[in-house]
Image: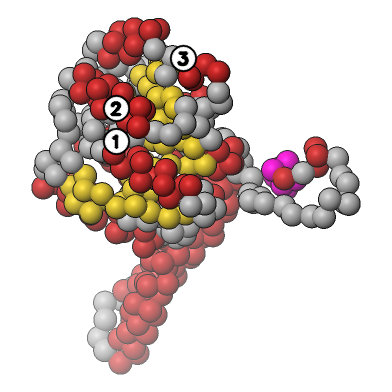
Amino acid sequence: MAADSKPISYSIVIPVFNEEAVLPVLLRRLDLLLARLHGPAEAIFVDDGSSDSSPVVLQALAKRDPRFRYIGLSRNFGHQVAITAGMDAAQGKAIIVMDADLQDPPEVVEQLIAKWKEGYDVVYARRLSRAGESRFKRATAHLFYRMLSRMSSVGIPADVGDFRLIDRKVLDALRQMPEQDRFVRGMIAWLGFRQTEVTFHRLERAAGETKYPLSKMVSFAADAFLGYSMTLLRFSSIAALGLLVVLVFVAIYSLYAWLYLEVTPGWTSLMISIIVASFFQLISLSIIGEYVGRIYLSTKSRPLFIVDAIKRSPQTERPAASDGFDLHRQGGG
Ligand code: UDP
Ligand code: MG
């Protein structure tokens, strides 16, 4: 078929974890979508250790139709890792990540592609509304996105999930980020490039139930905040500063009481020792925090910077090997 001969234009990456209920309708809609796209396209299903019939169905499909590919992970590694595995295998010039449950409508993919053709490297889909989700999920998601986009240092947009399109060059840069705790949307925000959004109304799950129980939501949020906000790290510094004022007042009061009021013998010295000791502990913790933060950042082994484009006149001949992405590798030392 077409996918065999011509280079692939679009790769659609779909993480799948126990989604047998939704697969029939997903496959029908995907088939229609692939037919509408102008250019050869592939859909890559990443089975994230499903225990239902999803792997059987998807493997059979991949065998009979070359537009569909199947990657089975050896166990459940989680949504973010599944996405990463799928993107690693993608061959397209544009790579689209989409959930299996059709909460991300496949029709929006065409809008993502239209923006990409305008020249954007990252096109994310922002949710204007969310249907069919519990009040708890909506409230926690609302809070999560607001806090994260305020506290993050790289401008992670609010109400944006992993439903997005990235250009090949963004994927190549993303693959240079070997970090363990993967929060893909944060990593893509960190990368930069020309980013834009399209908006959509998030639909109800077409079938089945959410595969994100509270425990997974909590560890997901932890990855986001620990990886993309310095606020938690600076907690002891902030506490030290905040308490400094209080501690100084308490110390002054203790001295005043010792001089002019009746106090139990020993109270003043006890107060002053506690205040001095707590203050030095907070200061030491914040200094250690800063060091740990720097060590944490270095262990991520991210490139120092990402080159988007290099322009020079054709006369300046240089060997291609010292070009582009490889340059900054030396920076990690
Ligand atoms: N998923 C996955 N591994 C997991 C959990 C979820 O691959 O451990 C997939 C799931 O099959 C779906 C996508 O990630 O395609 C989003 O999950 P879900 O729809 O359950 O999350 P929600 O929309 O409820 O936040
Ligand atoms: Mg969903």
Whether residue 58 is visible: yes
Which stretch is magenta? 325-332
Q: Earlier in the sequence, mark 2 or mark 3?
A: 3
Can you identify the residue that label 3 sits on?
A: 1
Residue at the far bottom in the pictured view: 260
SS label for mark 1: helix
Label 3 neighbourhood size at 10 Å, few (<14), some (14-19), many (20+)?
Answer: few
Alpha-carbon span between mark 2 and mark 3: 16 Å
Q: Is the residue under label 2 in contact with that under label 1 (CB below 8 Å)? A: yes
Q: Secondary structure at mark 3?
A: loop
Q: Is residue 54 above or below residue 174?
A: above
Residue 16 image offset from top left, x and y in percent: 31, 23
- Asked whether, in this view, residue 148 is left or right of residue 300, the answer is left
Is 331 in the magenta? yes
Residue 146 highlighted magenta (yes or no): no
Q: Main secondary structure of the magenta part?
A: helix
Amino acid on which disc 3 is placed: Met
Neighbours of disc 1 within 10 Å: few (<14), some (14-19), many (20+): some
Q: Residues within 10 Å of mark 2 (few under 14, many from 20)?
A: few
Residue 72 placement (x, y as % from top left):
40, 15
Kindly identify which residue carries mark 2. Answer: 32
Q: Position of residue 6 (x, y in %)?
A: 55, 23
The residue located at (59%, 37%) in the rendering is 172
Question: Is the C terminus in the top left, top right, bottom left or bottom right quadrant?
Answer: top right
Mark 1 to mark 3: distance in Å?
Answer: 22 Å
Mark pair 1, 2: CA separation: 9 Å
Quadrant in the rendering for residue 103: top left
Mark 1 lies on residue = 106
